[in-house]
Image: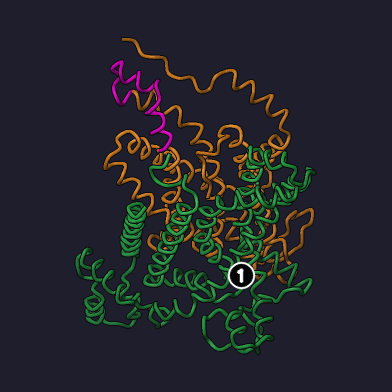
């Protein structure tokens, strides 16, 4: 018995609509371009802007933005632009890690729960419910306390809080798919359960997973900054947006707005742009609004 | 119906149980010996061993959990060694401030979302809707603690409309006699109008900042709901009966979507706790949030454990209540209904 052809989810026709889609949807194009610009700037920026983010220069303390320091300097004379770029890298990499860990764990859990049902499903549902009743930030704070304040603890804490979201949305989809004719006929033809799961169910989950990743990414970047702000995330001298805002807070109200101002703008841009894109993508891929929950 | 309620109650209890186990296990992993931290640096090993014994830290983890739950039911939340108070006392002192802030934020978020999205949908022009979409995206992406700083800088320091980060009352203003612990309410009860105005004046700005994220989330939801409702046949029927535009909107369209806000709003209520965690620190607001932030830095695990449990219970209770209200109000959401 030869295999039933795997469902083609990235059909060539879809790619064509994507480019024509971009041309029609100017807001989406703009937001995508801005976000791409931001990511490229934070990843490649340090190559161009070669001042070290933690180079202390007591001769140039608290300088206002100028050509030499486009975003000014902080209270130890560190260049704010260099720190914003370095901080962006910390945030974006951590956000991606959290989104990925959550996706992998959540997807495995959803496949197990959705295909095996019974007590496995009950167990996973109970577990995810129990985790989701804590606010993400509080859970990450507790994790930072139980381990050691720092990016690693926060990433673990936030991943722990992100996988249930994936699991919830994907589990429902897995169950829906198992009721569909094409899965039932594949099973009836004698396909191995594992083959059904990986060849026929899993590919359908990918678009949902990507959408969920966008939502998780934005929330994770924001939470990481929040933890950094409270002194539980990135530890000095690591540059991180939230921690920079804490640093600049005492100067913010006395006139040196640039130290806390620019990291805040970076954060605002990164998260708002992701939200906008995820939103727009959801309208296209999930018009009934069934799958993706952000938070 | 009764079975249904019992079932949901069971799920809620199981969830709280899971959450409490989780919080317990997580915080028993705190590095460093809590007994050593409490006893201080100068304590002898024997003293620490005795303290460990009295705290029950040498027992089996199941026994420890049992003792913990037992003392919870006796109203004993443990002892906060960094402040030298029992956690129960701390919570009683701090909870009203957070509750006051949280409740006003909920009001702001829901009222703001309903009004803003009604305007955006009712107006036939395009820009109100655009404005709402863009501003809500920005609000969802904005770090609350940073917005708090910005608001303080512009509205309080530059324009002087709101007070600075000085807590709940201006220095020199006496706190009203304690009834609920919420200063605005207590001031009204005592008839101290000057105090009421002062407390409200300190409350508004933090409440707006905390409400911003939930407002953005709810206004998007409600806007989509409204636009969906406008396409329903009952709206067409009402219009073809000759009703004017506003009555159709106010009587038929707007209330239709309100109920759907309830589950989302209940989720956000729990989220407000997280929001106030960040905003309280900026405004010097003496609530649960600033207490938790301090406790974590001090590794005061009894406080953190109590706050985790409180957050979990709050979440479960509020979502259970929303669930039950939804079931009572909307037969379509009943389990087993088709």
x and y percentages locating residue A17 in the rendered image? 64, 23
Whether residue A47 is visible here, answered yes or no, is no
- Report the front residue among B123 and A17: B123
| Magenta highlight on residue B45 | no
- Give me the chain that's orange: A
Q: Chain of mark 1?
A: B
- Vertical placement of residue B291 versus A162, above or below: below
Q: Is residue B254 above or below residue A36?
A: below
Magenta residues, start to end: A172-195
Left or right side of B296 for B64: left
- Mark 1: give few (<14), some (14-19) or many (20+) Cα within 10 Å: many
* Percent position of residue A258, x then y: 72, 61
A162 sits left or right of B134 in the view: left
Quadrant where the N terminus of chain A is found in the figure: top left
Horizontal side of B241 relative to B57 (left or right) equals right
Helix, strand or loop: magenta stretch: helix
The single residue placed furthest to the front in the displayed view is B241
| A51 horizontally vs A133: left or right | right
Chain that is green in the image? B
Residue A55 horizontal/vertical position (percent): 62, 58
The answer to whether residue A173 is magenta is yes
Closer to the camera in the image, A49 or A105? A105
| Callout count | 1
Residue identified by numbered label 1: B282
């Amino acid at each position: 018995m030869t295999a039933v052809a795997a469902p083609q989810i990235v059909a060539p026709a879809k790619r064509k609509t994507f480019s024509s889609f971009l041309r029609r949807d100017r807001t989406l194009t703009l937001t995508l371009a801005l976000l791409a610009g931001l990511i490229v700037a934070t990843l490649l920026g340090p190559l161009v802007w070669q001042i070290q983010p933690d180079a202390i220069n007591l001769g140039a303390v608290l300088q206002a933005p100028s050509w030499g320091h486009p975003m000014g300097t902080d209270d130890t004379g560190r260049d704010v632009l260099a720190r914003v770029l370095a901080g962006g890298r910390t945030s974006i990499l951590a956000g991606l890690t959290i989104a990925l860990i959550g996706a992998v764990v959540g997807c495995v859990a959803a496949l197990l729960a959705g295909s095996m049902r019974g007590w496995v499903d009950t167990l996973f549902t109970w577990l995810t419910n129990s985790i989701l009743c804590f606010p993400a930030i509080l859970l990450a704070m507790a994790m930072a306390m139980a381990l050691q304040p720092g990016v690693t603890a926060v990433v673990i804490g936030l991943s722990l809080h992100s996988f249930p979201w994936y699991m919830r949305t994907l589990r429902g989809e897995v169950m829906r798919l198992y009721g569909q004719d094409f899965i039932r006929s594949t099973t009836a033809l004698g396909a191995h359960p594992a083959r059904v799961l990986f060849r026929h169910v899993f590919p359908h989950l990918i678009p949902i997973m990507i959408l969920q990743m966008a939502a998780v990414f934005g929330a994770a970047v924001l939470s990481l900054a929040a933890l950094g702000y409270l002194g539980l995330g990135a530890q000095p001298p690591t540059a991180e947006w939230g921690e920079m805002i804490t640093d600049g807070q005492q100067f913010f109200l006395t006139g040196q707005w640039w130290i806390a101002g620019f990291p805040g703008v970076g954060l605002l841009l990164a998260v708002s742009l992701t939200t906008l894109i995820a939103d727009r993508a959801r309208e296209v891929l999930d018009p009934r609004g069934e799958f993706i929950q952000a938070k | 119906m009764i079975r249904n309620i019992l079932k949901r109650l069971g799920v809620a209890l199981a969830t709280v149980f899971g959450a409490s186990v989780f919080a317990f296990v997580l915080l028993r992993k705190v590095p460093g010996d809590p007994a050593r931290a409490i006893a201080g640096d100068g304590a002898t090993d024997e003293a620490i061993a005795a303290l460990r014994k009295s705290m029950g830290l040498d027992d089996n983890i199941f026994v420890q959990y049992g003792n913990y739950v037992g003392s919870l039911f006796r109203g004993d939340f443990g002892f906060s060694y960094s402040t030298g108070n029992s956690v129960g006392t701390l919570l009683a002192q701090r909870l009203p401030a957070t509750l006051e802030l949280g409740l006003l934020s909920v009001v702001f978020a829901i009222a703001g979302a309903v009004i803003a999205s009604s305007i955006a949908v009712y107006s036939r022009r395009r820009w109100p809707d655009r404005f709402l979409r863009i501003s809500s995206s920005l609000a969802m992406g904005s770090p609350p603690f940073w917005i708090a700083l910005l608001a303080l800088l512009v509205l309080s320091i530059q324009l002087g409309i709101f007070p600075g980060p000085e807590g709940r009352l201006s220095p020199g203003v006496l706190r009203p006699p304690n009834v609920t612990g919420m200063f605005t309410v207590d001031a009204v009860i005592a008839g101290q109008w000057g105090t009421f105005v002062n407390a409200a004046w300190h409350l508004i700005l933090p409440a707006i900042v905390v409400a911003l994220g939930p407002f953005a989330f709810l206004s998007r939801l409600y806007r989509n709901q409204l636009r969906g409702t406008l396409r329903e046949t009952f709206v067409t029927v009402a219009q073809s009966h000759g009703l004017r535009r506003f009555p159709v909107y106010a009587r038929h369209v707007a209330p239709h979507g309100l109920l759907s806000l309830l589950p989302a709003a209940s989720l956000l209520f729990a989220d407000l706790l997280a929001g106030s965690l960040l905003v309280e620190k900026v405004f010097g607001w003496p609530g649960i949030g600033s207490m938790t932030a301090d406790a974590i830095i001090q590794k005061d695990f009894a406080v953190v454990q109590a706050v985790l449990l409180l957050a979990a219970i709050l979440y479960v209770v509020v979502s259970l209540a929303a669930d039950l209200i939804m079931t009572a109000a909307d037969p379509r959401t009943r389990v087993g209904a088709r």
